[in-house]
Image (spheres, rainbow, N blue to C red):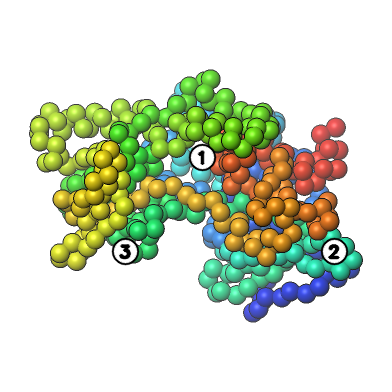
Amino acid sequence: MAAMPTDSGQQTCQPQSATQPDYDLVCIGFGPASLAIAIALHDRGVNARVLYIEKQRSFIWHAGMLLPNARMQISFLKDLATLRDPTSKFTFINYLKSNNRLVAFTNLSTFLPLREEYNDYMSWCASHFEDQVQYGYETESVAAIDNQKGPITTWQITSRNTETDHMSTVTAQSVVIAIGGKPKIPIPLNGLDSRVVHSSSYSITVPQILKENWKAHSVAVVGGGQSSAEIFDDLQTRYPNSSVTLFTGASALKPSDDSPFVNEVFDPERVDTFYNQAPESRHQSTLADKSTNYGVVRPELLDRLYEIMYQQRLHEPDLSKWQFRIVAWQAVIGFEKSSDGDRIRLRLKNTSNGEITISDASFDLAIMGTGYERKGHETLLESTRDLLQENNFAVERNYRIKYRKDAVKEDCGIWLQGCCEDTHGLGDTLLSMLAVRGGEMADSIFPSQSQRARL
């Protein structure tokens, strides 16, 4: 294995030499997608020099949404290994066995572990690869190293130490970009006030802002999906004397559909079907299956929330006086500071008639469950745009970016993970595909080694 890169005071960029690159593969981001690749490479017995670069200081998955009693929305059998190789040491079942909890877990009679436990499972998997991970570095660019003798054979990856700002540069024959989504807050609300925060940092940021749990705070939650509903529910326990209002532009909170036939949307073989469709057919398929993942809530949580609403109705018929409220048909499009300057009021748009109003209540905090953007790879790869077959970062079925064949050598490429929903379907950003996809990535990047391992 190549030596771990060290800090340097400046970036370096030089013509390609005859020496081999530092690594056979560099994965940018070490979340679940890259971890699944690491596991597949291990299980395949691939002998390669691999580096994973991760901006967090240690492995953790959605730290801001590890809420008490929150459960996974997929079966533990859709872990990082089982659907590809049930005999892998990295299955969730083997994790339970290794931690002396297998029998106790079976007594729960559930396929849905706590989110906290699933994070611990993935952290346990990640601990096996610590000598290959460079934590605390955020990658800023990936560039081709000029090869005056022909197509590109090497990439240069430049990363910044998140504590010291020193730069580190390594080279690799192949690169995987799996940086996850960037929290998305609508432009009129983004970065304008510290009292507007994204749901992704909820359990970390909110206690720093609202420090007195017993105080009667006023909090707004924006969005009609699972994260918003979970936060709305959690706030009622975390700040029991506070008033909490959830705003959604939809007509109501709507249930997710995880019925068996619909769940086949996430079967691994469905990716081939989806990829081979015409772009317009893909778009229509995504719209038709949207209720499996976007802007929807698990039915059992909806039942719980409705019961809370009903209990309030029992004691107070005037909805405006309720401590916990769900307001439909109201999209949040902006905010303004209240007269005392310590709170904010929300600018609302009635989605049924377009009317613009300002919220009657003022809020200490607004938590935005407004999803993620998945275009970060475009910034990292901007310098490679002139190598593309088209003027976009389109990918092949194996997730490899379509660079011109005369520009990039066949055994040298860049692969994308978690940002290919338009071409690979709704499961692209979800955990349920990772075990099988990790194997596909190993086969694609190291075809000869992976094939021998499977014989």
Q: CA distance from mark 2 to mark 3?
A: 49 Å
Using a 10 Å C-alpha cutoff, classify the residue at mark 1 as few (fewer than 14 neighbours), some (14 to 19) or many (20 or more): many
Amino acid at pointer 1 = Tyr
Q: For marks 2 and 3, give the one nearer the viewer.
A: 3
Contact between labelled residues 3 and 2, with CB atoms less than 8 Å apart: no
Q: Is residue 23 left or right of residue 218?
A: right
Label 2 Cα crowd, 10 Å radius (few <14 / some 14-19 / many 20+): few
Q: Position of residue 78 (x, y in %)?
A: 58, 32
Residue beneath label 3, please? 193
Residue 275 point in image, percent of width and height:
66, 35
Badge 2 marks a residue whose secondary structure is: loop
Tell me which corner region of the image, top left, top right, bottom left or bottom right, holds residue 71: top left
Amino acid at the residue labelled 2:
Gln
Which of the two marks, 1 or 2, is nearer to us in this view?
A: 2
Q: Counting residues from the N terminus, which is met first, the one under dot 2 or under dot 3? A: 2
Circles 1 and 2: CB distance less than 8 Å?
no
- Vertical order, 320 against 364 (above or below): above
Question: Which residue is painted at 31% across and 52% down in the image?
Answer: 333
Disc tally is 3
Q: Is residue 252 visible?
A: yes
Q: Is residue 64 left or right of residue 329?
A: right
